[in-house]
Image (spheres, rainbow, N blue to C red):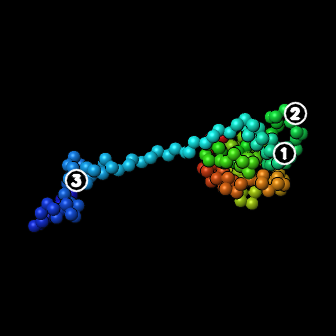
């Protein structure tokens, strides 16, 4: 780049930003900016209290009861567990906790193991009207055979336990459409 100046002095060139900057000169604003400017603050989420084992147990039990020990995608009914953990059902976060998912019953689904695996991998998701959306190129055909015949998620009766629409949208957009499993 060639800059041609005619009959202007150095101060005029500084005023219009044409003079070279000297960051080591205290008379240059750039000198002070490098000391006074704040660097970018690294993103650090607010430290949260880790949930207690009692909180996690209560959440787990509440989701199982909410869905009446039934897989939300297949509709298969299971008996209540004899111990705390259920052998045939998984409690699956819709929006993964490490990605900002809340520790609330509305962020969890009760799923059979094969549905849990497909949901976590992004092979199946839930549409805005709670319809099951399946990527036939990625899902196990045996799972498709046992999905709820009406093509919709089986919802809990209690409104407080129904899936959070924002979490469902997050799963559709960030996990299903991006073909990337979340950090569950």
> In which quarter of the view is residue 4 placed?
bottom left
Pick out the residue farthest to the right. Answer: 79
103 sits left or right of 28 in the view: right
> Which residue bears the numbered disc 3?
28
Left or right, 123 with respect to 72, comes to: left
- Residue ID at (80%, 41%): 61
Q: Nearer the viewer, residue 103 or 166?
A: 103
The reply to whether the C-beta atoms of the residues labelled 2 and 1 are less than 8 Å apart is no
Q: Is residue 70 visible?
A: no
Work out whether residue 105 can be spotted.
Answer: yes
Q: Residues within 10 Å of mark 3 (few under 14, many from 20)?
A: few
Q: Position of residue 136 (x, y in %)?
A: 71, 49
Q: Residue at x 22, y 46 (%)?
A: 24
Outermost residue, top side: 83
The extreme left residue here reads: 7
Please tell me which of labels 2 and 1 falls first in the chain: 1
Q: Quadrant of the N terminus?
A: bottom left
Q: Secondary structure at mark 3?
A: loop
Q: Nearer the viewer, residue 1 or 48?
A: 48
Q: What label sits on residue 65 in the rendered view?
A: 1
* Residue visible at 75% across and 57% down in the picture: 130
Q: CA distance from mark 2 to mark 1?
A: 14 Å
Q: Using the image, determine if residue 59 lies above or below residue 129.
A: above
Q: Position of residue 91 (x, y in %)?
A: 76, 42
Q: What residue sits right under mark 2 in the picture?
A: 82
Position of the C terminus, as image quadrant, is: top right
Crowd band around label 2 with a 10 angstrom C-alpha radius: few (<14), some (14–19), many (20+)? few
Nearest the viewer among 58 and 22 is: 58
Dot 2: element: loop
Q: CA distance from mark 2 to mark 3?
A: 75 Å
Q: Could you give the CA–CA distance between mark 3 and mark 1, rounded to whole angstroms?
A: 68 Å
């Amino acid at each position: 780049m060639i800059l041609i100046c005619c009959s202007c002095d150095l101060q005029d060139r500084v005023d219009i930003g044409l003079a070279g900057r000297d960051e080591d000169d205290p008379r240059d604003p750039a000198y002070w900016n490098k000391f006074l400017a704040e660097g970018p603050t690294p993103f650090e989420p607010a430290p949260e209290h880790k949930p207690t084992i009692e909180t996690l147990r209560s959440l787990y039990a509440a989701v199982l009861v909410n869905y009446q020990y039934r897989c939300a995608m297949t509709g298969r009914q299971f008996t209540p567990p004899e111990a705390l953990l259920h052998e045939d059902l998984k409690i699956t976060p819709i929006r993964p906790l490490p990605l900002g998912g809340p520790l609330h019953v509305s962020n969890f689904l009760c799923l059979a193991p094969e549905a849990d695996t497909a949901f976590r991998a992004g092979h199946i998701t839930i549409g805005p009207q709670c319809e099951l959306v399946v990527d036939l190129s990625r899902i196990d055909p045996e799972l498709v055979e046992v999905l709820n015949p009406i093509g919709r998620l089986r919802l809990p009766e209690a409104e407080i336990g129904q899936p959070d629409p924002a979490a469902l949208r997050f799963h559709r957009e960030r996990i299903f459409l991006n073909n990337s499993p979340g950090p569950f």
